[in-house]
Image (cartoon, grey):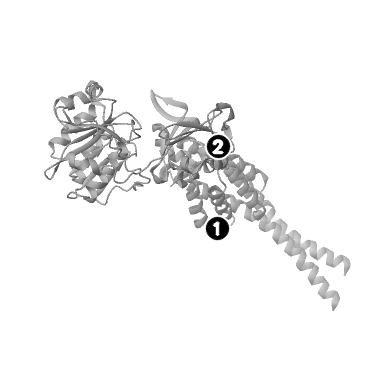
Amino acid sequence: MLSPILEVLPLSIRGMVESLPGKKKEHLEEIRVRQGRPLEVVSPWQYGFVSDRGRLVNREEEAYRPGREDCEKMLNLISNHSLYALEEELRRGYVTIKGGHRIGLAGRVVVEGGQVKHIREVAGFNVRIARQVKGSARSLLPRILRGSRLENLMIVSPPQCGKTTLLRDLVRIVSQGEGIASRKVGVVDERSEIAGCIDGVPQHEIGPRTDVLDGCPKAEGMMMMIRSMSPELLVVDEIGRREDSEAVFEAIHAGVQLFTTAHAKSMEELCRRPGISELVREGVFSRYVLLSRRKGPGTVEGIYDRNLCRITGREATVTG
Amino acid sequence: MIKLLGACFILLSTSAIGFHIAKNFADRPRQIRQIRGALSLLQTDIVYGSRRLDRICEQIAAREKDPVQFLFARCAEYLQHLDGVSTFECWKRSVDETWPRTAMREPEREVLTDFGKTLGISDREDQLAHLARVQTSLEVEESEAREEQARYEKMCRSLGVLAGALIVILIY
């Protein structure tokens, strides 16, 4: 599973990551390469630095420090020697690679007319390892069905709590019709996270009846989907801006069900977000699922209904 | 009889040398033209297709004839298989390996090697600017090569034959 990731690491670092203990490798969440600073790996419960012999160490001084050459090689491997083909990705600050994994980029940003044009001298990479946890959303299914109808669902959590993983699995379940009637699903994947597309082809398993608009702005994408692909379920990731909520209203009134996610630590925080509070007040969503990392990513903290009343208590279902 | 045979032999070999040098004069502008054609393909693919460099090189190699084919095939191979070596390194190696097979000279080689330093590592606009610069430099070289061809090609051929004839006359 790690092979597409190893392919983009420069030889020196690749060796170190490969010789990490098997268990650590299995649970890797992030590999962080920063020029001149220690090589870091992050797993769900801890972080650590990697020494040049590929051992995990806690002390910074013992860790391997990637140099300028490492970073240049890594960029070469990520871009396949073709930086010009990554213009859009450099503007957004991340690249999706084979397997749906994502690499965030940091460095000197070039701005033109107040807008980010691209990143020059990339000196920081965050390799985020995407995991598809099939079946992670199965236990949620009874809560989001009303008769044969799907509820409009919003998954709420801070970053890195398994929001997207859960959403992805929901997409797969609905599209495959696993335990429910199968539906046509339209995914607007602005940040290539849900489907992890390369050249328009999804890298994750998202079901046979799923259409993906990759890299498309959410608000516009939702309308495009409804007009052109006639989905029964529309899926978007991380709404929050005002134009997003307008598009959500449009979609809901076009008779399409909607699954989406939003960043917030608690329901109170969610209601305070300007773009979203209106949606909550209007009762657009009939189910909210709150996630945390309390017992590992994907811990369901609670499921709420339209009026933000909790339906279930603090369930300790680890879903992913 | 043997004398006659020897004379023929001398005449043939000097003519062959003359023709060979003449062919180099004729090949050089043709090959520069060929490289320029390949580079304009490269430009189209970078600017409008924005495809991966190794794929572009492969495709150019499939369309062109030797020695340009060899240059791009090598480059594609290096880009794919030399783990994370800089683009310039891959390009330079391919140019170095291709050179003995060509009739081109040092100035073109410098232009091409220099071009490798910028290949692939910047955005589209920048790539376009560099490609345009290479094209102009190569154009200058090409016209020079053509002039040389006009001046020396025929001369080399006749010089070969005449030199042979001279030697034959002198030793006959």
Please determine whether, in this image, residue A190 is positioned above or below residue A275.
below
Give the side of residue A73 with respect to residue A173, left or right. Answer: right
- Front-most of B84 and B41? B84
In this orientation, which residue lies closer to the viewer: A242 or A43?
A43
One can see residue A155 in this view = yes
* Residue found farthest to the bottom: B1
Query: Looking at the picture, how far across and down is residue A60, in whole percent?
Result: 55, 27
Q: Amino acid at mark 1?
A: Lys
Mark carried by residue A179: none
The numbered mark 1 sits on a residue in which chain? B
State the residue in front, B22 or A176: A176
Using a 10 Å C-alpha cutoff, classify the residue at mark 2 as few (fewer than 14 neighbours), some (14 to 19) or many (20 or more): some
Residue B13 in percent (x, y) is at 76, 66
- Residue B4 on image: x %, y %: 83, 75
**Left or right: A194, with B39 as reference point:** left
Question: Which type of secondary structure does the marked residue at label 2 adopt?
Answer: loop
Q: Is residue A262 left or right of residue A69?
A: left
Placement of the C terminus of chain A among the 4 image quadrants: top left
State the CA–CA distance, disc 1 to disc 2. 51 Å
**Which residue does the numbered mark 2 point to in the structure image?**
A55
Question: Which label is found at residue B65?
Answer: 1
Q: Is residue A90 above or below residue A266?
A: below
Q: Position of residue B122 (x, y in %)?
A: 50, 36
Q: Residues within 10 Å of mark 1 (few under 14, many from 20)?
A: few
Check disc 2 and give the amino acid type.
Arg
Q: Which chain does the numbered disc 2 sit on?
A: A
Residue at 23% x, 48% y is: A175
Determine if marks 1 and 2 fall on one subunit.
no
Viewer-proximal residue, A286 or B96?
Answer: A286
> Residue at 24% of width from left, 51% of height from top?
A176
Looking at the picture, does residue B80 appear above or below residue B20? above
Residue placed farthest to the left in the image? A147
